[in-house]
Image (cartoon, rainbow, N blue to C red):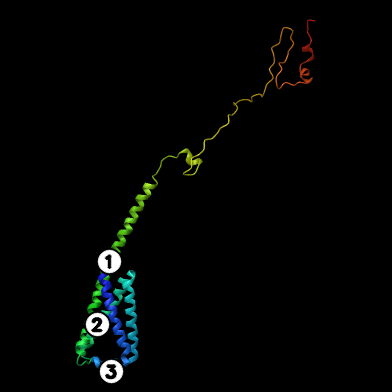
Amino acid sequence: MKAMLRTVLFLDAALNLALGVLLIASFWSSLYAAIEVPAPSPVLYAQALGVAFIGVAWLQWHATVNGQLTATVAKVTGHINWVTGAFVLGWLISGQLSVTGGGKLLMPALGAVLLVVGGILVKLASSVRTKERVQAAQQSGERVRGGVVSDTRRDPPRDYYEPRDVDAPRGARAEPRMETPQPPRGGSASVNPTPVAPAGTTGIVTPVPSDTAPTTNESTSSVPHDARQNPHS
C-alpha cells in the first residue's frame, strides 16, 4: 500500500509542478488564449500561487524518496488538492467563470482530477499511517517481552551468598586464607624454659645446661649460697 501511495504522490507532484509553471506564466496572454483558458488577474497573485504549487511539488517529490515523510506529506497535500479542485468546480458550476471552446472541457477535468487525486492521497495516507502505528506498537511490545525474558535468563535470583562473593569480585575466585595458630587462652606460655634437675639427697639443686642457659658466672649466683653447702658436713 505504501508503494501505491508513493506512485500517486509522484503523479500528483508532476501535476502540481505543471500548474505552478502555468500560473507563473500568467503574464503570457497568448498562451492562455491558445489553450482557451481565462488568464488570471492580477498577475502577481497568480505567480505567487504558482510558486506555492511548485513548492508543494518539490515537497511531494522528496516524500516519495523519504519513507518517513510519505504519509504526512501525502495527507497534507491531498487536502490541498481536493480543496483546490472543489473551488474550481464551484466556480464553473456557479457560472461566474466564463470559459469558451476547449476550456469547457479542460477546466472541469482539472477540477475533477484535483478532487479525486486529493481524496485518494488522504485515504491512502490514513491507511498507511494506521498500519505503521500498529506495527510500531507490536514491535515495542515484542521488545519489552524479549527484554524481560532475557534479563530473567541472564541473572537468575539467588537466595544465598557464597563466601567468594564477599572476598572477591564477581568472576574472580578468592584465594585460601592462611591462619596463624593462637596461644591458648587463660595464660601466657613460657618461652624456652630452663629445665631443672630434681634435688638429690644432698639438697643441692643442679641446673641442667641448655642452649638458653647463661654461660657466665651469673648462672651460679642465681642459686642461694646456703643451698650450695651440705648441711650435714
Separation of residues labelled 1 and 3 (CA atoms): 48 Å
From what the image shows, is residue 83 above or below residue 137?
below
Q: List x then y, in percent, for residue 86.
A: 24, 82
From what the image shows, is residue 215 above or below residue 135?
above
- Cβ atoms under marks 1 and 3 closer than 8 Å: no
Classify mark 2: residues with Cα within 10 Å, few (<14), some (14-19) or many (20+).
Answer: many
- Which residue was labeled with disc 2? 85
- Cβ atoms under marks 2 and 3 closer than 8 Å: no
What label does residue 30 carry, if any? 3
Separation of residues labelled 1 and 2 (CA atoms): 26 Å
Residue 34 horizontal side relative to residue 222, left or right: left
Which three-letter amino acid code belongs to the residue tagged 3? Ser
Quarter that holds the N terminus: bottom left
Which three-letter amino acid code belongs to the residue tagged 1? Thr
> Helix, strand, or loop for circle 1?
helix
The image quadrant of residue 6 is bottom left
Separation of residues labelled 2 and 3 (CA atoms): 25 Å
- Which residue was labeled with disc 1? 130
Q: List x then y, in percent, for residue 220.
A: 77, 17
Task: Name which of mark 2 and mark 3 comes first in the sequence.
Answer: 3
Q: List x then y, in percent, for residue 78.
A: 27, 76
Task: Name which of mark 1 and mark 3 comes first in the sequence.
Answer: 3
In front of the other: label 1 or label 3? 3
In front of the other: label 2 or label 3? 3
Using the image as rendered, state which of residue 171 and residue 91 is in the foreground: 171
From what the image shows, is residue 130 above or below residue 154?
below
Residue 196 horizontal side relative to residue 8, left or right: right
